[in-house]
Image (tube, rainbow, N blue to C red):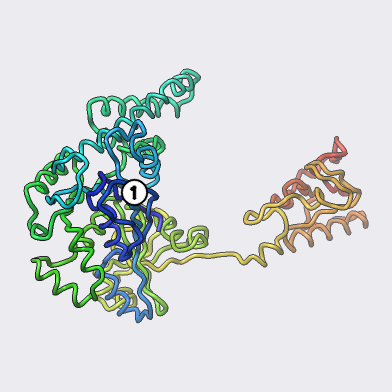
Amino acid sequence: MGFSCGIVGLPNVGKSTLFNALTETAAAQAENYPFCTIEPNLGEVAVPDPRLEPVAALAKSTAIVPTRLAFVDIAGLVRGASRGEGLGNQFLANIREVDAVVHVVRCFSGSDVIHLEGRIAPVEDIETIETELMLADLDSLERRIEPLEKRSRGGDPEAGATLDLVGRALMALREGKPARLIERKDAQEKAFRMLGLLTSKPVLYVCNVDEEHAAEGNAFSRAVELRAQAEGAGCVLISAKIEAEIAVLSRAERGEYLAAHGLHEAGLDRLIRAGYALLDLVTFFTAGPKEAHAWTVTRGTRAPQAAGVIHTDFERGFIRAEVVSWEDYVALGGEAGARDAGKLRLEGKDYAVADGDVIHFRFATTSVRRLRRMGPGSAARPSMPRCARDKRGHDDYRPHIPPRLRIAPRCSLMRNAISTSSAAIRANTMPASMPTKLAISISNPAIGLMAIAPSEEIMPANPNSTETTTTSQ
């Protein structure tokens, strides 16, 4: 799975406890002292999707494979991290590598867990981390202005477009706003991502509350929710302590435990779905007797690229996609019923995969053996001309042309044409169906045979010419 969410926050807010509950492991050390996490911990979790089981049942699949999302537990951040305080530099390097930020905020009281600032103030904690990230981005952007201006004055249009984005990002950061809030067009998204700004990552706030407030939240969590709404960010309410306890229970026991705390589902399920939505991902399904599989792509991905997520050969040889919406697939009893009802659609290369699509990809491939028979010059297996690697030791692209043609034609049609042409030359005759002159490209055999005008005789002006012609007498 190529998408990842980085779990960040101040020390001792419950990041590692939450990570261990998410991954149902004890991979991350969770202790009551700052910086117990130094190296980032990586774990993958299955994305809960109730649509997958009905698809598997209708396709009579023997295995069910859900899509997955990666979470990274990153070391805690402190005030002054942009200047290297604490593990700041390492923290900033790790956060650049993730696709989105899951910001864990302490919304529980209790003197048994140390707080670096000596008070419980989640909004101020958010501002502490946001400030350090903005300071790091300011320093990064200010160092890029001079080189970009030089390139822009030299007429580089790409540098000019990037300089415009940098200027607008700097303006927002100096006003105390994260870079993700600046307005930009779809065509500018790639250049904006290339800036690698920490505050450009989408953010999901996770309010870590105590057990008694897991269902309704408290005053601290409500303050965070207001902050998230103002920014257009997501917010999830979780008790990391409860999640850590149910992680060791069976599926049946988890339901009873959650009901005792007034919860209908685990907070981790809400967190995973929220992280999925944060990255703007969609799920499509493939189903067959062997397995029913959920796959993840970003919203707006075209059908060939979605096929490439399964296997690169699918994208390379893409022909079409047979698509049924999940609702129609389930309501009509599977692919056959959807086809009979006219709900199965044939989509081409421009189709944008929608969430819940059940897709059968049609593709064509060429076997490796056939590619090898095609010889040098084939599009799938480019190579040097045969004559540039012969026993004469010619290792450049201007080999000496011997009296007889010494190339390996790329198909039987070319071999037959050359043989017929050579025999006709020796007999001083030329079949009516053959061109009077045939030119054969040595440097690029893929060009094949070319018919040329029958008037004048053509001889290579240069003995090292890369094109040889045969002429009738």
Which residue occupies the foreground of this view, 239 or 349? 239
Q: Which residue is mark 1?
A: 74
379 relative to 227 in the view: left or right? right
Q: Quadrant of residue 326?
A: bottom left
Q: Is residue 100 left or right of residue 316?
A: left
- Name the spot of residue 234 as percent of width and height, x first: 20, 48
Q: Position of residue 300 (x, y in %)?
A: 34, 51
Can see residue 208?
A: yes
Q: Quadrant of the N terminus?
A: bottom left
* Residue 25 percent location from the top left of the image: 33, 65
Q: Residue at x 23, y 64 (%)?
A: 244
| Residue 183 can be seen in this image | no
Which amino acid does the dot numbered 1 rest on?
Answer: Ile
The residue under the point 33% across, 24% down is 167
Image label count: 1
Q: Relative to 380, is 467 above or below?
A: above
Residue drawn at 26 percent across, 52 percent down: 15
Relative side of 96 to 402, left or right: left
Classify 58 as above or below 186.
below
| Direction from residue 457 to residue 364 in the image, left or right | left
- The crowd level at tag 1 (other Cα within 10 Å; few <14, some 14-19, many 20+) is many
Q: Residue at x 38, y 61 (%)?
A: 347
- Farthest residue, direction right: 427
Vertical placement of 280 versus 162: above or below?
Answer: below
- Return the x and y of residue 200 as percentages of the image width and height: 31, 38
Nearest to the observer: residue 59 or residue 450: 59
Question: Of residues 328 and 252, which is closer to you in this image?
Answer: 252
- Disc 1 is placed on an element classified as loop
